[in-house]
Image (tube, grey):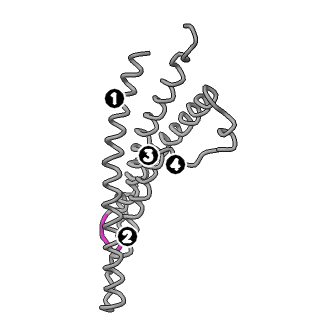
């Protein structure tokens, strides 16, 4: 039990650091996207010379920020859930429901990760017309996001497993 708790503590610190980096990366992307869109609008309507690559770049940045933002919401437990069921549960039943939920989400994320890597590899030969970069840079956000979400999910799962397996207070062992 103590070994599991120490693994959970190490993984939680790792997850926290990954989340910190992801937050700053998303903030940077959103600031960049805002400036880029404002520049694009200025060039189009004031200078009457639209940037050919403006919309494509904004879409690329938005995809990355949105998909990475999912992992932040997951870590904060702000992701969608079935509250009609979980609001009726408490204690060990709620922990068990969370563990099963995390395992199912983890399975889904593994499929997305594997599929995302495969699609990214296939899309290397297709190029974004205005930016002239590989379409893979856009698709790569899917497996990267799935990997970051898996890191957060493992942290949550370990927390719930440790809570589920620790002896209840006030009861004799």
Q: Is residue 165 left or right of residue 45?
A: right
Question: In this orientation, which residue lies closer to the viewer: 170 or 144?
Answer: 170
**N-terminal label among 1 and 3:** 1
Kindly identify which residue carries mark 4: 78
Please report the bounds of the magenta region as a residue range.
129-133
What is the crowding at mark 3: few (fewer than 14 residues within 10 Å), some, or many (at least 20)? many
Q: Quadrant of the N terminus?
A: top left
Separation (CA) of disc 1 from disc 3: 21 Å
Q: Are marks 2 and 4 in contact (CB under 8 Å)?
A: no
Looking at the image, tell me whether mark 2 or mark 1 is earlier in sequence order. 1
Quadrant position of residue 28 = bottom left
Q: Position of residue 106 (x, y in %)?
A: 50, 37
Please name the residue that numbered disc 1 is placed on: 10
Q: Where, by quadrant of the figure, is residue 63 drawn?
A: bottom left
Indicate which label's residue lies in the foreground, 1 or 3: 1
In the picture of the structure, the residue carrying the numbered disc 3 is: 146
Name the residue carrying label 2: 58
Looking at the rendered structure, the secondary structure element under dot 4 is loop
């Amino acid at each position: 039990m103590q070994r599991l708790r120490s693994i959970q503590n190490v993984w939680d610190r790792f997850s926290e650091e990954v989340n910190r980096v992801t937050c700053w990366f998303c903030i940077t992307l959103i600031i960049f996207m805002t400036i880029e869109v404002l520049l694009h609008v200025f060039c189009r309507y004031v200078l009457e010379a639209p940037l050919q690559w403006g919309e494509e770049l904004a879409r690329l940045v938005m995809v990355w920020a949105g998909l990475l933002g999912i992992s932040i919401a997951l870590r904060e437990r702000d992701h969608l859930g079935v509250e009609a069921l979980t609001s009726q549960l408490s204690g060990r039943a709620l922990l068990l429901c969370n563990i099963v939920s995390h395992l199912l989400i983890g399975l889904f994320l593994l499929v997305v990760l594997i599929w995302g890597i495969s699609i990214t590899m296939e899309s290397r030969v297709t190029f974004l017309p205005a930016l002239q970069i590989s379409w893979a840079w856009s698709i790569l956000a899917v497996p990267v996001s799935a990997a970051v979400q898996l890191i957060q999910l493992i942290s949550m799962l370990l927390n719930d497993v440790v809570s589920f397996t620790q002896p209840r207070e006030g009861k004799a062992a």
